[in-house]
Amino acid sequence: MATLRGSCHCGEVGFEFPDEFEFMSFCHCTTCKKLSGGVGTASGRIHTGAIAILSGEELLRTYQPEEGSAKTFCSACGSNLFGNGWPESELTSVRLSAIDTPFEGRPRGHIYVRSVAPWETLPEDGLERFEAESRPVRRQRQA
């Protein structure tokens, strides 16, 4: 099993974990949009206990929105690193953009598509779509 390494933009926070993603997805929830400054986040779920912080632990800050799970970022550069309630949750969403080591695989779905904004266009990439996290959205056929 390969070990993946990741870091924040300024390089002060470093972490590693085994390449054992449970699921990779694009999240379009409102909170992920605000945190990313774009259309959402791309993340891979992994068991929280498998993540080792190598440097900069004192720089990690966590924001808990009123709805949804906590998001963790570097307080020096603002890089969004973890979601899904790290370090308290059983599973953590590691932001794929924070991973420095090349890895195989790609997201298998779009989650929280109920939050897609009117100005946003989901790609026709063939990936499964979920209103929230677990129920697929039926695609309408185009005439």
Image: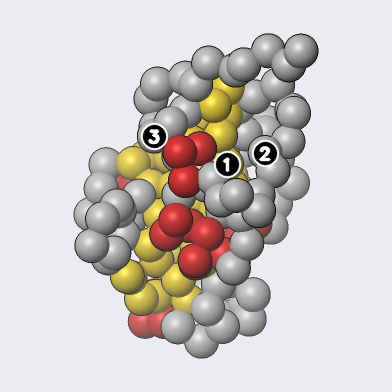
**Does the CB distance between marks 2 and 1 fall below 8 Å?**
no
**Does the CB distance between marks 3 and 2 fall below 8 Å?**
no
- The residue depicted at 74 percent of the width and 28 percent of the height is 125
Q: Is residue 106 left or right of residue 131?
A: right
Q: Quadrant of residue 71?
A: bottom left
Q: Is residue 43 left or right of residue 107?
A: left
**Which residue occupies the foreground of this view, 95 or 50?**
95
**Does the CB distance between marks 1 and 3 fall below 8 Å?**
no
Residue 40 location, x and y as percent?
A: 56, 53
Q: Which residue is the site of mark 3?
A: 132
Q: Which residue is the site of mark 1?
A: 26
Tell me the element at label 2: loop
Residue 115 location, x and y as percent?
A: 47, 46
Compute the Cα span from label 1 to label 3: 12 Å
- The residue depicted at 50 percent of the width and 37 percent of the height is 113
Q: Quadrant of residue 26?
A: top right
- The residue depicted at 39 percent of the width and 75 percent of the height is 60
Q: Which residue is the site of mark 2?
A: 122
Q: Residues within 10 Å of mark 1 (few under 14, many from 20)?
A: many
Q: Is residue 97 left or right of residue 53?
A: right
First-in-chain label (1 vs 3):
1
Q: Amino acid at mark 2?
A: Leu
Compute the Cα span from label 2 to label 1: 10 Å
